[in-house]
Image: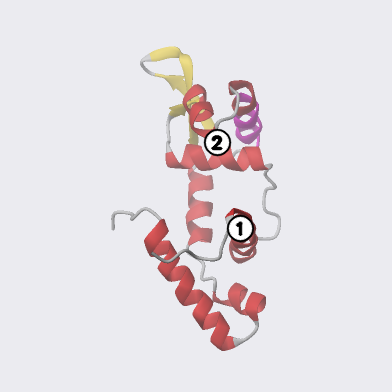
Amino acid sequence: MYRGDVDGGQLHRLGRRLIELSRQATGEPGDLALTPGEAAVLEDVLTHPDSSVSETAKRTGFVQSHVSASVARLTERGVLTTGPDPTDGRRTRVRATEQTRNAISRRAARRIDDTLADAVTDPATTQRVTALLDELAKLLLPQRPQ
């Protein structure tokens, strides 16, 4: 069995670099600045719409008060919307606004070619990096229904 040279530290740094590149490829001037905690809460809400604050807290590993504060800030900024749980009025259900979902879908569909070309500079290496990222995405990301 092949045992690669990448260790946990390199994997972490690679992940952070890929996040930087994704922000460059998908960012827009005037984008809303999110704290890492807010970004994690938003990602969870996008993945699990209509979850309660406590369910989001369990999945993210944050304490409920932190998730509640993040949800409140994101709701004030028009990123999230909240409403009562129809089966239990004591619970609040959280979902991303339509505007947020549309903005994320629009940005996610952007090509990354120019960002990679700027990061790597050599066209042959850029092509190889693109192919490797395509392969990693197929191997490591859950397949979405078409």
Q: Residue, x 48% and y 47% (percent of image)? A: 101
Left or right, residue 16 beside residue 97: right
Q: Amino acid at mark 2?
A: Leu
The residue located at (55%, 87%) in the rendering is: 124
**What amino acid is at disc 1?**
Ile
In-image side of 115 versus 104 (left or right): right
Residue numbers of the magenta segment: 68-77
Say if the magenta span includes residue 33: no
**Element type at mark 2:** strand
Residue 89 picture quarter: top left
Nearer mark to the viewer, of 2 and 1: 1
Rendered location of residue 83, percent (x, y)? 48, 24
Q: Position of residue 82 (x, y in %)?
A: 51, 27
Q: Label 2 belongs to which residue?
A: 80
Question: Residue 145 appears at what percent x and percent y?
Answer: 29, 54
Q: Are marks 2 and 1 in contact (CB under 8 Å)?
A: no
Q: Between 94 and 126, which is closer to the camera in this rendering?
A: 126
Secondary structure state at the residue bearing disc 1: helix
Residue 14 lies, with reference to residue 123, above or below; the image says: above
Rendered residue at 47%/42% (across/down) = 46
Main SS of the magenta part reads helix
- Residue 42, compared with residue 30, is above or below; it is above
Task: Work out which residue is located at the far left of the displayed protein and give it.
Answer: 146
Query: Callout 1: 10 Å neighbours few (<14), some, many (20+)?
Result: few
| Residue 59 sits above or below residue 12 on the image | above
As drawn, the label of residue 19 is 1
